Image: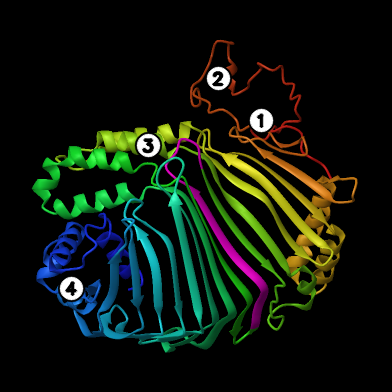
Amino acid sequence: MKRVLPLAFVLALSAPAFAQTVDSQGAKQLSDNLARYFGKQAFDKGVLKVSVEGDAYKIALDVKALVNAVPEQKLLKFDMAPYALMVKPRSDGSWDVSSNFSQGASFEFDGPQGRQSMDFEIKDGKLTSVYDPALAAFTNATSSLAGMTMTSREAKQQADVSTGPGTATITSSKSANGGVDFTATQKISNFVEMIKVDDPNNGLNFPLTLKTPELSVDANGKGVRTKPLLDLLAFAVANEDEAKLKANQGELKSLMLAALPVWERIDGNYGFKDFEVDSPVGKFGAAQFSTAFGMDGVSQSGKVDYTIKASGLTIPHQTLPEWTVPLLPTDIDLNFGGANIDLDTMAKKAIEAFDLNKNPPLSDEFGKALVADFKAKNPKVVIAHSTVKNGNIEVALEGEMTFPGEKPDATVTIDVSGYDKIVDALKEGAKSDEQMAQAFPFALAVKGFGKTLPDGRLEWMINTKADGSVTVNGAMLKGPDAAPDDSAGQNDNSNGDDGANGTDNSTGGDDSDGGDNNGGAGAKLQP
């Protein structure tokens, strides 16, 4: 529901403010503009309605009517009041947009796990904003709510969510390279989610509570192609008929190309303060916990980035052997993603080649060629500098991987401080744990492979090549894989009776590599 409302007024106001006088003629023009994106049936069935209210227009979105218009949903119950927006044209061509989005709703339906239901309530929700149709974006917007509750029930599980007060803001401006740049923030206090699972068939019966006194969301984008995306949506509504869509696919291709690169860059971050998870085995927690995501738009050398950070981690010890406690992480900083991703060439070739009059619109051969072209640009899987810490122990790693053939070509560097602490913990575990007793000698051997840095850290630089070879700190651990022997099963009798007596005298009987080259492997790295 929270996505439907913003979409409604963004599309409603995507045309310039047409008059300063608010009247029935203006309401009709606004309705016609909405119909371009939602279709005329939305008005015929009462889903959308525009009316004059004082010096503003009221846009009502009746979600209940929308549900009734889609009978295959088969909802057993649905109660929800219409959303309403008040919009007023400004002298500069933009619009004032406001709303009281306080809301309560409940619905019930038959799902895969039996009857399911949901109830939610938004308390004292308010929105004030200014929308610029030239940008198809809000130049500024502020919203707030006093709190929210939601309950979801199904046969074997129930979830109850509640929050305290929350605020959100967004600002937008024209991007230097086209499109819109935006910044958005949101903060919600006292987030609590209680989950109860009762599944006798699987022997599950436990409560789980997630809570944080502060949940924050930050996002920003550059060059978001808002207007071309709206044009694509309008085209979809105007060409719902399959025959019409096929006839107008040339226009569709032009609109799709105009929407590229969709955006230049979008980044977002979810942050949790004093995050806790109460479970039957104890309490998990983090003083700070965040996840971040960033992605370039459709470009010839795009990047995707993910980050997971946590500090002040606490993990219950009740179910763990005591010797593992020194190894439990207290801080993590993981950074990974992709680079050199050419989506631009793929997108433009696919748009040019597809034909809706064919089934499938893109042939399997074209798809395979497209994937081959993508791989030929050598996209990378990247591990940026990442760390896992606990007391005097810190494990850091970074590297990258490409796929020049069927096997990867990768370089990964691992640094460890406090490796002796790890060995001591494993040694203690070996006294009571058979698996640790087997792993302990391996931990000692790994230490021998490492390079000691000036600050005392141990480092392992691991290289794996597409030919199957592996080196650690420059020393060969495994050589290239043996090339396939195309002559296997064929007898070469050119040297007299070599083939007849089963003896190969071509080497003079001298096995200079010790009789076992392990498929071409080089010298084994010794600790």
Residue at screen point 42% across, 40% down: 343
Disc on res. 500: 2
Location of residue 60 with respect to 397 vertically, above or below: below
Label 1 – label 2 distance at C-alpha: 27 Å
Q: Where is residue 444 drawn, in percent x and y?
A: 83, 55
Visible residue check, residue 73: no
At label 2, counting other C-alpha atoms closer than 10 Å, the crowd grade (few under 14, some 14-19, many 20 or more) is few
* Residue 525 appears in view: yes
Q: Which portion, as a residue range, is magenta?
A: 283-302
Which quarter of the image is occupied by the C terminus?
Answer: top right
Q: Which residue is mark 4?
A: 51
**Labels 1 and 2: the sequence-earlier one:** 2
> Which label's residue is closer to the chain start, 2 or 3?
3
Q: Residue at x 29, y 84 (%)?
A: 114
Please give left or right for residue 318 compared with residue 294 in the image: right
Question: On the image, numbered disc 1 is attached to which residue?
Answer: 520
**Residue lying at 14% horizontally and 40% vertically, measured from the top left:** 357
Q: Is residue 193 left or right of residue 420?
A: left
Dot 4 and dot 2 residues touching (CB under 8 Å): no
Residue 511 sits in quarter: top right
Q: Earlier in the sequence, mark 1 or mark 4?
A: 4
